[in-house]
Amino acid sequence: MLDPSHPIPAEQQPLRQYAELREAFPFSWPALGWIPYLKRIFGVWGAVVLAVSPLVWSSFAGDWGHFVSGSVLGANVLLGLVLLHLYLGWAYVRRRLVQAQIPYEESGWYDGAMYAKSEEELAQHRLIVRYQIDPVLQRLRRSLWGVVGLSGLAALLWPLG
């Protein structure tokens, strides 16, 4: 999988970056099955609701409609940021895998170089992207749209609170 004779330092090799991302907390979550993934996402959302509720309550004490809507909106904003962070991490590794030439640094920011992948390496990377990374990115996009939809619903219900 990883070639020690590769000119790119090991920590900058796209396959290694992919393997590390797949195992990293919380980046491994979107690669799980739907149920474990949703348990973690709803767990984060629930924890954030509990964290923002006292602040929202101090602003809307006694106004239950605004309290619930405000708590949901606050949690959705923070969950949306978490999902965006996950998406950007996976998108970065995807971009490194699909590029025919990738930049790397030999020993520091001042001595960058470019590496041209072989046809076999590029084909292998693109298969990984198609069957492993693209489904993860699609799941994260759907999750982000779900958060946006729930936020929109909470915002529409705000005047009724």
Image (cartoon, rainbow, N blue to C red):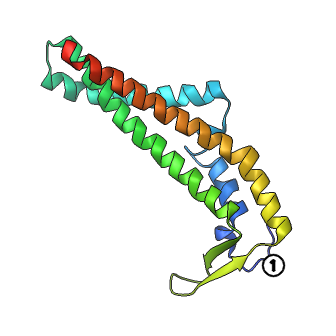
Res 157 visible: yes
Q: Is residue 75 left or right of residue 26?
A: left
- Crowding near the residue tagged with mark 1, few <14, some 14–19, many ≥20 C-alpha atoms within 10 Å: few
Q: Position of residue 93 (x, y in %)?
A: 62, 58
Q: Nearer the viewer, residue 54 or 62?
A: 62
Q: Is residue 88 left or right of residue 32?
A: left
Q: Quadrant of residue 126?
A: bottom right
Quadrant, the N terminus: bottom right
Residue at left 19%, top 17%?
159
Residue at left 25%, top 24%?
70
Q: Position of residue 155 (x, y in %)?
A: 28, 24
Above or below, comparing residue 98 to residue 78 in the picture: below
Q: Position of residue 97 (x, y in %)?
A: 69, 61
Q: Quadrant of residue 18?
A: bottom right
Q: Nearer the viewer, residue 150 or 66?
A: 150
Q: Is residue 72 left or right of residue 54?
A: right
Asked which secondary structure carries label 1, the reply is loop
Judged from this view, the residue extending furthest toward the right is: 120
Residue at left 54%, top 33%?
142
Kind of residue at disc 1: Ser
Q: Quadrant of residue 153?
A: top left
Q: Which residue is mark 1?
A: 5
Q: Is residue 38 left or right of residue 135?
A: left
Res 1 visible: no
